[in-house]
Image (tube, rainbow, N blue to C red):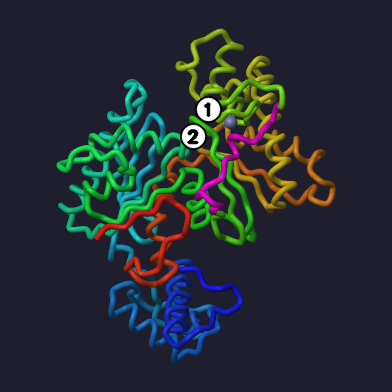
């Protein structure tokens, strides 16, 4: 339902909804706040605030949490969101692992379960069975604890991986038998009958950063996620850019026109040099050890110890990442480039090298204005996946799915 740009008027109802979402979003973001401070922060009339807050308290979305000194004078009753009103299952699927957890409306993560090393089998059936199993465990525990689960948010690998996954995994879809056209979202909905939102895991990491990261004044940034592949996310003015397919493909930026042929058909793609298997494979080859035995922690430690072969390889990896970052920065002029995913302690090391690389190569007016920041957070992926559902609640101030989730992602709704 796209409004014609320039003709979108506001009627009484949309104004009320808009104010309600402004109030809820403010309380969610500022954590504890009084009605007087809310009026000051939002610019809304105190009478409007009282009305909306009463409504939100009645519906259980907000609660009063005692009296405290306000920043603008006498003590006042504090408001906060009611994080236990509803819960979301956040799931992170990679090509060889599944993690799932229960997340409350404030983003608090509990009951995490993980399955790793799932690439032992050649078919994806095994991977998807573990995905369904992990959701089932979380839902069962939530049900025992009397928690109200309202949806499932899933971060998944790139679309190349997810699409054949749907087809091959259709046979695990449940009592109705195999359906050729069944998507991953439909498989999950048919099993659990809850709303499901799926997006690429570079986007879920960017979402996590947006809601829980220390962004300061940054409102435009990109995220390069190095995992089994290399994924990307572009955030413009706090919104994830969806393009025409819901995601972007930083992994397939050309960084060597004479490079090897990539699975996408192009040559010299970033992913060939900077995916996690590519990094560990090259370090291992230089050290003469088997790649699977190397962890990112070991590589980072060897780099920090000045191990020559490791330093050389990591600098080379940073050069390719830097080349891609120059093209991205020159195209989008973001305030920051985040680098992360399962890179762990390698993320800040690579970020610093990429920062040095781009500083002399990006367009002169951009120099000194773009930060490259390494993110090695482990919790972010499942929490970011849950935010695919929770962000709609924050943006509307309602538990319902009346307002459509951001267009473009693999979005499915049940019931
Ligand atoms: Zn490619």
Q: What residue is drawn where x is 75% and y is 47%? A: 330
Nearer to the camera, 161 or 108: 161
Q: Which residue is mark 1?
A: 276
Q: Hey, which residue is sitting farthest front in the picture?
A: 180
Quarter holding ligand 1: top right
Q: What residue is drawn where x is 81% and y is 46%? A: 363
Crowding near the residue tagged with mark 1, few <14, some 14–19, many ≥20 C-alpha atoms within 10 Å = many
Q: What residue is drawn where x is 33% and y is 64%? A: 83
> In the rendered image of this protein, does residue 368 appear above or below residue 320?
below
33 sits to left or right of 309: left
Principal secondary structure, stretch drawn in magenta: loop
Q: Is residue 248 magenta?
A: yes
Across the whole image, how many numbered discs are drawn on residues? 2
Q: Position of residue 15 (x, y in %)?
A: 47, 83
Crowding near the residue tagged with mark 2, few <14, some 14–19, many ≥20 C-alpha atoms within 10 Å = some
- Location of residue 107 (image quadrant): bottom left
> In the rendered image of this protein, does residue 196 appear above or below residue 226?
below
7 sits to left or right of 15: right
Q: Hey, which residue is sitting farthest bottom in the picture?
A: 47
Whether the residues at callouts 1 and 2 have beta carbons within 8 Å, the answer is yes
At mark 2, the secondary structure is: loop
Q: Which residue is mark 2?
A: 342
> In the rendered image of this protein, does residue 188 appear above or below residue 241?
above
Q: Nearer the viewer, mark 1 or mark 2?
A: 1
Nearer to the camera, 283 or 122: 122
Nearer to the camera, 399 or 72: 399
Q: Is residue 239 magenta?
A: no
Q: What residue is drawn where x is 54% and y is 79%? A: 8
Image quadrant occupied by the N terminus: bottom left
Q: Is residue 72 something that shows in the picture?
A: no
Q: Which residues are magenta?
A: 242-256
Q: Position of residue 110 (x, y in %)?
A: 31, 49
């Amino acid at each position: 339902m796209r409004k014609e740009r320039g003709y979108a008027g506001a009627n009484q109802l949309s104004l009320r909804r808009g104010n309600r979402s402004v109030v809820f979003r403010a309380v969610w973001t500022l954590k504890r706040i009084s009605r007087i401070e809310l009026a000051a922060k939002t610019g809304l009339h105190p009478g409007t605030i009282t009305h909306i807050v009463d409504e939100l308290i009645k519906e259980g979305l907000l609660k009063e949490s005692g009296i405290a000194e306000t920043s603008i004078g006498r003590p006042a009753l504090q408001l906060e969101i009611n994080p236990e009103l509803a819960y979301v299952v956040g799931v992170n699927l990679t090509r060889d692992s599944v993690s799932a957890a229960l997340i409350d409306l404030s983003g608090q993560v509990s009951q995490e379960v993980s399955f790793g090393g799932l690439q032992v089998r050649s078919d994806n059936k095994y991977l998807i069975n573990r995905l369904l199993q992990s959701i089932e465990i979380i839902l069962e525990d939530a049900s025992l604890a009397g928690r109200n689960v309202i949806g499932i948010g899933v971060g998944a690998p790139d679309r190349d991986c997810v699409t054949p996954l749907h087809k091959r995994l259709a046979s695990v879809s449940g009592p109705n038998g195999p359906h050729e056209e069944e998507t991953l979202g439909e498989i999950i909905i048919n099993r659990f009958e809850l709303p499901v939102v799926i997006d690429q895991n570079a986007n879920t990491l960017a979402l996590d950063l947006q809601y829980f990261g220390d962004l300061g004044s940054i409102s435009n940034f990109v995220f390069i996620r190095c995992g089994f592949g290399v994924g990307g996310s572009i955030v413009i003015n706090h919104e994830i850019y969806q393009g025409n397919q819901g995601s972007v493909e930083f992994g397939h930026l050309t960084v060597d026109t004479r490079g090897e042929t990539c699975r996408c058909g192009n040559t010299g793609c970033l992913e060939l040099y900077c995916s996690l298997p590519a990094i560990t494979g090259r370090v291992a080859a230089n050290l003469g050890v088997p790649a699977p035995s190397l962890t990112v922690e070991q590589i980072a430690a060897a780099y920090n110890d000045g191990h020559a072969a490791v330093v050389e390889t990591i600098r080379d990896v940073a050069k390719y990442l830097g080349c891609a970052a120059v093209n991205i920065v020159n195209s989008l002029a973001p305030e920051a480039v985040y680098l992360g995913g399962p890179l762990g302690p390698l993320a800040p090391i690579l970020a610093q090298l990429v920062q040095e690389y781009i500083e002399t190569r990006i367009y002169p007016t951009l120099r000194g204005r773009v930060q490259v920041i390494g993110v090695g957070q482990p919790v972010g992926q499942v929490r970011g996946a849950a935010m695919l559902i929770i962000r709609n609640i924050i943006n509307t101030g309602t538990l319902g799915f009346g307002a459509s989730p951001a267009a473009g992602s693999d979005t499915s709704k049940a019931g």
